[in-house]
Image (cartoon, rainbow, N blue to C red):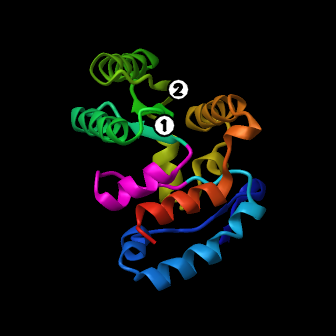
Amino acid sequence: LTDGPDNIKFLSGGSGVEELIRLDKKQLRKFVNSISILDKLFDVILIDTGAGLSQNVMSFIMAADEVLLVTTPEPTAITDAYALVKMVSRRDKKKPINIVVNKADSPREAEEIANKLCMVSQKFLSLRLLKLGYILYDDNVTKSVKMQKPFSLYNPRCQAAKSISEIALKLFSQKKPEEITGAKGFIARLLSYFGV
């Protein structure tokens, strides 16, 4: 675990998800036991699965308490987002799916994209998505990447940092303590998806 700002810690995954799937059952059980301590250390665990609909990615998504789906205005990204919603709905109609539109040119564009995804999900899948917000395109993000520094530290007052704060506040203010199963619930579900 690497220390980040404000008591945030992160584990850089890289291709870790793919490597994790290649473990045999004994190795996977050992790995799961070693990460189960996270439940005692952290209030929230976010897992960035990256794009795609592989079985590995879907296992992590289905093991999670809820889904935070981030898409962009690009047509292929919107299509991929809907495909993921469809896959999740086939397996669990009750799994909460939150949507965030990233790199939008305007609030209007972001709202239109979120509204379309919500509409088609409701109409064709009978699934209600929760709109968490959007992040407008912000040059500060590109600059911060070049500086190898999180944009929220590079320029805490930039629009992207403000948007992330608003989204986080909205996401966590709607949670009731009994709705959060923590790492133990996630790990148990993950083991069942991997057949361990």
Whether residue 185 sits left or right of residue 73 in the image: it is right
| Residue located at (40% from left, 83% from top) | 24
Whether residue 183 sits left or right of residue 61 in the image: it is right
Position of residue 20 relative to residue 138, above or below, is below
Whether residue 126 sits left or right of residue 83 in the image: it is right
| Residue located at (31% from left, 25% from top) | 125
Residue with the mark numbered 2: 133
Residue with the mark numbered 1: 95
Q: Specify start and end residues of the magenta stretch as a single range.
A: 47-65
Residue 123 location, quadrant:
top left
- Say which amino acid is labelled 2: Gly
Q: Is residue 90 magenta?
A: no
Whether residue 88 sits left or right of residue 146 in the image: it is left
Q: Is the residue marked by circle 2 packed among few (<14), some (14-19), or many (20+) residues within 10 Å?
A: many
| Local SS, label 2 | strand
**Residue 148, horizontal then vertical, whole percent:** 54, 62
